[in-house]
Image (cartoon, grey):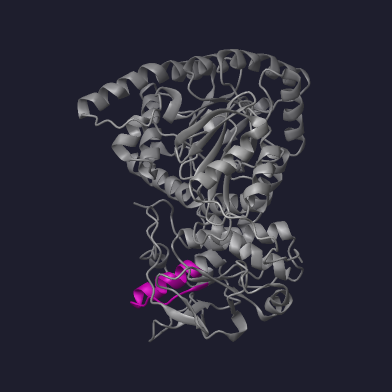
Amino acid sequence: MLYCESPLFYQRRRTREIVIGDPSNGGLIIGGDHPVAVQSMLTCDTMDTAECVKQTLELVAVGCQIVRITAPTIKDAANLKNIVEALRAGGCLVPIVADIHFKPDAAMEAAKWVEVVRINPGNYADSKKFAIKEYTDEQYAAELERIEERFAPLVKLCKELGRAVRIGTNHGSLSDRIMNRFGDSPLGMVESALEFARIARKNDFHNFKFSMKSSNPKVMIECYRLLVARLEQEGPDWNYPIHLGVTEAGDGEDARIKSAIGIGSLLCDGLGDTVRVSLTEDSPREIEVCNDLLAQMSVLAAPIENASAFGFRPSDLVPGWPFDPFVYSRRSTPEIELADGLKCGGEQTVRVVVTRATYDKVAPRISLKADVKPEAVYDDLNVLELDPSQEFEINCETQLVTVKDGVALPPIAAFRLLGVRLKRLGRNNPILLKDCLAFEATPLEPKIALLRAAVVIGSLLADGIGDAILVRGEAGGGQSLRLAYNILQAAGCRSFKTDYVACPSCGRTLFNLQTVTARIKKRTEHLKGVKIAIMGCIVNGPGEMADADFGYVGGAPNKINLYVGKTAIKFNIPEVEAVDRLVDLIKEHGKWTDPDPEPATVLAAH
């Protein structure tokens, strides 16, 4: 199975067009040759019409092309009429998406008023009790019939009214039926979505798109790749558009890195027709990150028609891939000595290398016990620089290799091709990844340097390629070092600090996510290796927390439920004491350490 034309060159996946509203009157066409659309979601109560209108206008003002609003009940769905009417009366024609979980009746009501209805197959027609049950083929077929009875009416209504549908599965919120047959896996996510797509197609309805979201960028990448490969297998008329996003990415630099790894990797491979960056921040900030990320594609991906300019034969475009695109596995390499007493490759963690200039800036300010510190200096390494666009010979696979600066290929393509060349030679040399192969004449803005480094290094790490990394595009010494470690953490390669999964807030949210997230981080950010999920409501609760160690979930207004894994342990805790009780829970399970009174590392951004 293949999910793109080539791992080396960009060629956008050609999808069928779907219509969002009236394209002649403010609507959009998604897919085909149309530009990738950017979107976001409101954070306020759907019953607050005035605030919904205000937030929508704020999003549109910064370039948002599609706005999503949650509709948890029929009452909320009915109020979408008032919101849309107020927007249209004010001249705002942006398409509106109703976000539906659990309530098919709410979806039916919402479809009367908005251009798109988003449903989650994991909870649209199924309950989720984390029950273990073996389904016979007959029982499974009967369940599919029941799902069709629930979903087909919405399909028929959307077809009648000219609406679009987003079939959006989420890692961790799959139905018990799917979980028992396929597990909480990319395959389960894809099969869940395809079941609903088949119902739509059975009713000759094709105005829909897919999404496959996870808070883990590696899982998200695998899901989308598998989805597209499966659609290709189903036939040429299954070329439906794709909505890209890393869900519950959190806030700040970490959220941007996670989003850049997941979304950027797929965009570089030609996938994606609309994107949303989920931030636990004010929604307009999401649009800036979307646009910045899309703007990097011309630099990070070379069009497939440029292959001849680099001297490639057609047979080189889909070579023996150096990675399995559907199942993550780190590329096998021998263990070698990187620097005095420091090894890389093999089973060693991915190492962080810096330039001499960066080392001289940051080393005097870092203590020996610091978790964030340079592990080797590039200028001092025995590293062989190769041009993968040319054939080469290498006789020793304990030699560290990298791509030579100045190679006329985007870095992702260059390092993938390096892996291909080594594989053809039967060599497994450890590889040092670089975020760029040429320095900009003018230093990049920090936000752009972050996105480029995250896309390049994160994408390759998600492929299983890379034994050490070097970030040079960020001019600030301290910032480049922190960025390298943060990319490793976001890619799931190395844990040096607390990991947070936080939803971006919506009308379902039962507390102020930004305030509470900041409060929890202040108390727990020293817990290296602990993963904490902060969820505004049960929709983004035990299921979508997936692999978090602990969860802080809105259970009712001003009431919090605390989880260990996917199991609720404490219920209806007053919000004013919930953070303290979360700390107590972490202590009870032996995951707590007291913070160091003297920070090991203090690095300025520049």
Location of the C terminus by quadrant is: bottom right
Between residues 376 and 396, which one lies in front from this camera angle? Answer: 376
Tell me if 350 is positioned left or right of 438 in this view. left
Q: Is residue 132 above or below residue 549?
A: above
Between residues 516 and 46, which one lies in front from this camera angle? Answer: 516
Residue 553 locus on image (x, y percent): 56, 33
Asked if residue 33 can be seen in this view, the reply is no
Picture quadrant where residue 331 is located = bottom left
Tell me if 167 is positioned left or right of 113 in this view. left
Asked if residue 139 can be seen in this view, the reply is yes
Residue 367 locus on image (x, y percent): 67, 73
- The structure residue drawn at horizontal position 40% and vertical position 39%, both measured from the top left corner, is 189
- The structure residue drawn at horizontal position 35% and vertical position 65%, both measured from the top left corner, is 320
Residue 220 locus on image (x, y percent): 48, 47
Between residues 169 and 413, which one lies in front from this camera angle? Answer: 169
Q: Is residue 439 above or below residue 560?
A: below
Q: Is residue 339 above or below residue 25?
A: below
Q: Is residue 393 magenta?
A: no
Between residues 311 and 548, which one lies in front from this camera angle? Answer: 548
Q: Which residues are magenta?
A: 415-432
Q: Is residue 421 magenta?
A: yes
Tell me if 515 is positioned left or right of 561 in this view. right
Q: Is residue 287 above or below residue 149?
A: below
- The structure residue drawn at horizontal position 36% and vertical position 77%, both measured from the top left corner, is 427
Tell me if 299 is positioned left or right of 561 in this view. right
Residue 4 locus on image (x, y percent): 44, 53
Question: What is the count of numbered marks?
Answer: 0
